Amino acid sequence: MINGVKRAFYVLIFFGFVSSSWAANIELISGHVRAMPSSVPNTAAYFKVVNHGKAVKLVSVDTPVAKEAQLHTLLDDNGVIKMRQVKNFALGAHSTLTLKPSGDHIMILGLKKPLAVGSRVALTLNFSDGSSNTITLPVQKVSRTSEKQEHSDHSHHHH
Ligand SMILES: [Cu+2]
């Protein structure tokens, strides 16, 4: 009887370890989901995460607040900035993945209801090794100054 209890205890510890190491390698540094006017059913998430483990790829994202979340990047097509869906974002061993308005981002499509500024959105990040991490990001308006900054960093000069 005592042996049986002990064994169950060790089994619990073992699985506890497996499940925690399975998801503990990704650390959220910062991030937000962009607040949009209530008439717009789509938005985007930006965040910075550090991968403390082996190289993996972020292959998909799930969120309960919308129909779909896609991995997007921005391409400069002869001076026209275009969004394009990509299959994954590579996350090297012990490296940082930064998603930002001027580059890679998570596109959130088909919001079930408008996101209130200050509310929080859960995103489950699914990786190529089968692990996943759920992060929670605040909904924020993008400040005018940081938006202007982004644009002036990438301004094109027409002659
Ligand atoms: Cu996009």
Image (spheres, rainbow, N blue to C red):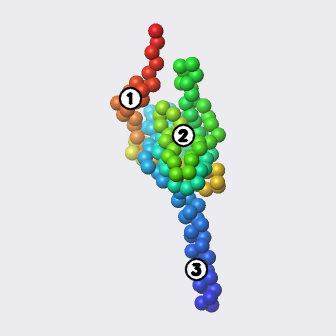
The residue shown at (47%, 45%) is 48
Q: Nearer the viewer, residue 28 or 134?
A: 28
Q: Which mark is residue 106?
A: 2
**Residue 87 image offset from top left, x and y in percent:** 64, 40
Sequence-wise first label, 3 or 2: 3
Q: Residue 70 falls in which quadrant of the image?
A: top right
Sequence-wise first label, 1 or 2: 2
Residue that badge 3 annotates = 9
- Quick one: label 2, few (<14), some, or many (20+) residues within 10 Å? many
The residue shown at (43%, 47%) is 30
- Quick one: label 1, few (<14), some, or many (20+) residues within 10 Å? few
Q: Which mark is residue 149?
A: 1
The residue shown at (56%, 46%) is 91
Above or below — where is 108 with respect to 50? above
**Residue 99 image offset from top left, x and y in percent:** 50, 40
Kindly indicate whether the residue at mark 2 contacts the one at mark 1 (C-beta within 8 angstroms): no
Q: Which mark is residue 14?
A: none
Q: Nearer the viewer, residue 18 or 61?
A: 18
Three-letter residue code for mark 2:
Ile
Three-letter residue code for mark 3:
Phe
Sequence-wise first label, 3 or 1: 3
Q: Element type at marker 3?
A: helix
Q: Is mark 3 within 8 Å of ligand 1?
A: no
Above or below — where is 81 with respect to 71? above
The residue shown at (55%, 24%) is 76
| Residue 55 visible, this angle | yes
- Between the C-alphas of marks 1 and 2, the distance is 21 Å
Q: Element type at marker 1?
A: helix
Circle 3 or circle 1, nearest the eye: 1
Q: Element type at marker 2?
A: strand
